[in-house]
Image (spheres, helix red, strand yellow):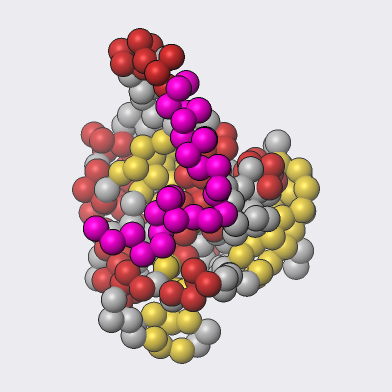
Amino acid sequence: MVCQGNCYSERQYLPDIFQGMQQAHSLIAKADDLLWTGERAPATVAVLLPRSAFVWDTAAVTQDGQIQVWENMTQHKADYEAEVWGIYTALTTHSAVSIDFVEEDGLTEDHLNKYKLLLVTAPDVPSENLHAVTRWMRSGGTLLTTAGAARKDRYDSPDTTVTAASGIEEEPHGRQILDESFATGTRWSISGTGVANWQNARGSWSALGNRSYAPSWVQSQSIHANRSYSRSQPTTHCTFSDGSPAIVSTSVGSGQHFHFYWLPGLSYVENATNWERLPHPEEFPETIRQML
């Protein structure tokens, strides 16, 4: 196997990597009697791993008003993929929140019933799975979606399942792709800023990558009026500096739907100050971490 400069032994900016590994292995050895018999605590938070969206990334992607065709999906990084990594880093690595990754096939009521919270970043999700998610939500689950998430089915056709259930509307949102230049220092641009004053989240924050926009709530409610759903009017928790909603939520039956009109996970990891080494948690934006 050829490493091609991407193995820990070839990272020149980690000269003490072996010393750190020796220390870690020593700690593991001392705790072996406990670790061997230990079991991972069941997670109550799940994050959907994108799948159906990948094929449409390679076919045609709208970026800055242009259609770009990709021949190899391994040569680019989509914003909703980076969003998964950022959410994992903020919740598990930096906040000790145990999460499970679930496949689209796991979006069934039976499987979701063991979770309290499901986070979805993927724009394309099969319709039958979205219907299962909304039924789980009405039964008491909490769904969190980010900009552009769960708005299309596996065929990349518009799907209003989640919108009809929660009443949270979003203007059409295009995914954003970075090619291999991502590894050479190209970064996502800032699309909005704001100041948070919501629960434990306090302070300024910046949204990176594409953001989305909400139409008027009156129009949203009239278009998707549906007596079969029991839901509240959307509540805005945070706004952008231009006054538009940044985070909103609704009650859906016994559950809730939270929606970020931006990409908090991508914004979180891209704000670390030093990637020439393993960055420390305090280098990441605490405000965004507290939002999540």
Question: How many numbered marks have been drawn onto this rendered protein structure?
Answer: 0
Q: Residue 206 falls in which quadrant of the image?
A: bottom right
Q: Residue 216 falls in which quadrant of the image?
A: bottom right
111 vs 226, left or right, is left
101 vs 246, left or right, is left
Q: Is residue 168 visible?
A: no
> Which residue occupies 51% across, 66% down?
170
Residue 252: horizontal and vertical position, in percent? 46, 42
Residue 62: horizontal and vertical position, in percent? 43, 82
**Residue 26 colored in magenta in the image:** yes
> Which residue occupies 40% across, 88% down?
67
Q: Nearer the viewer, residue 138 or 34?
A: 34
* Picture quarter with the N terminus: bottom left
Q: Is residue 284 above or below residue 220?
A: above
**Residue 281 colored in magenta in the image:** no
> Which residue occupies 36% across, 64% down?
4
> Which residue occupies 39% across, 86% down?
68
Q: Nearer the viewer, residue 146 or 130?
A: 146
For this orientation, the residue located farthest to the bottom is 66
117 vs 185, left or right, is left
What span is colored magenta in the figure?
A: 1-27
Residue 159: horizontal and vertical position, in percent? 34, 65
Q: Nearer the viewer, residue 195 or 41?
A: 41
* Picture quarter with the C terminus: top right
Q: Is residue 142 above or below residue 152?
A: above
Q: Is residue 236 above or below residue 222?
A: above
Q: Is residue 183 visible?
A: yes
